[in-house]
Amino acid sequence: MATRTFPFSTLINKQTSVFPALDDADVILERRDAENLVLMRSERFDAMVKGLGLAARSLAIVAKGNRRLAEEVFAEELPWLVWLPADARPQCVAELLDHLLAGAETGLLLPFSRALREWQSTAEIYSDPDLTRRLRGPFDTAEAEEVERPGRSDG
């Protein structure tokens, strides 16, 4: 599906230029100081939700019958897995699959999205050996200062 992008102010000031775009595209409303919004016709939204739900439930059926196969299929779609250490790959795939299956059951896919982003970021760090080495330490803390944490009391 195509998307069209408008500044949020266009929706406020010139609705007549935004709503016709919904005939053949989803609309992204860009906001300056907040997360962007997406407008779409309910028919397209319902189709997307039903399609995603069907795909996730189908994967859940496969996972129940053959977890290893489901993990292999899942891993095929994540080419950045090669950057993770070999022993971390199964953990990554299993965690992502669990989040996706839970999301399909509950309709809450943000935990899956967060985990996917976190694992991909981790893989990208491992893709840079120098960065990986630096993040493993040791760290020079000679000039570090002790800072009191908010809300922490010693008594």
Image (tube, grey):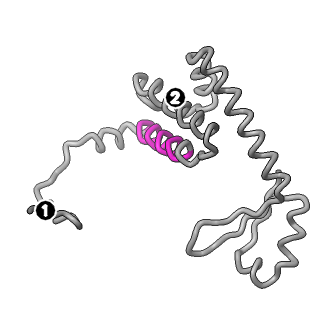
What residue sits right under mark 1 in the picture? 146
- Give the answer, above or below, for where 116 lies relative to 85: below
Say which amino acid is labelled 2.
Val
The picture places residue 98, in percent across and down from the top left corner, at 53, 32
- In the current view of this chain or complex, which residue is farthest to the bottom? 13
Q: Which residues are magenta?
A: 113-127
- Side of 79 relative to 126 (left or right): right
Q: Main secondary structure of the magenta part?
A: helix
Say which amino acid is labelled 1.
Glu
Residue 51 image-quadrant placement:
top right
Q: Residue at x 71, y 69 (%)?
A: 29
- In the current view of this chain or complex, which residue is farthest to the left? 155
Q: Residue at x 57, y 71 (%)?
A: 34
Along the viewing direction, whichever of 14 and 130 lies nearer the viewer:
14
- Give the answer, above or below, for where 134 lies relative to 32: above
What residue sits right under mark 2 in the picture? 93
- Give the answer, above or below, for where 60 lies relative to 103: above
Q: Is residue 130 magenta?
A: no
The picture places residue 90, in percent across and down from the top left corner, at 47, 24
Q: Is residue 124 magenta?
A: yes
The picture places residue 79, in percent across and down from the top left corner, at 58, 31
Res 33 label: none
Q: Residue at x 72, y 39 (%)?
A: 52
Q: Earlier in the sequence, mark 2 or mark 1?
A: 2
- Could you say whether the residue bearing mark 1 is in a helix, strand or loop? loop
Q: CA separation, marks 2 and 1?
A: 38 Å
The picture places residue 48, in percent across and down from the top left corner, at 77, 46
- Side of 95 relative to 14 (left or right): left
**Can residue 121 be spotted in the picture?**
yes
Along the viewing direction, whichever of 99 and 29 lies nearer the viewer:
99
Q: Residue at x 44, y 27 (%)?
A: 91
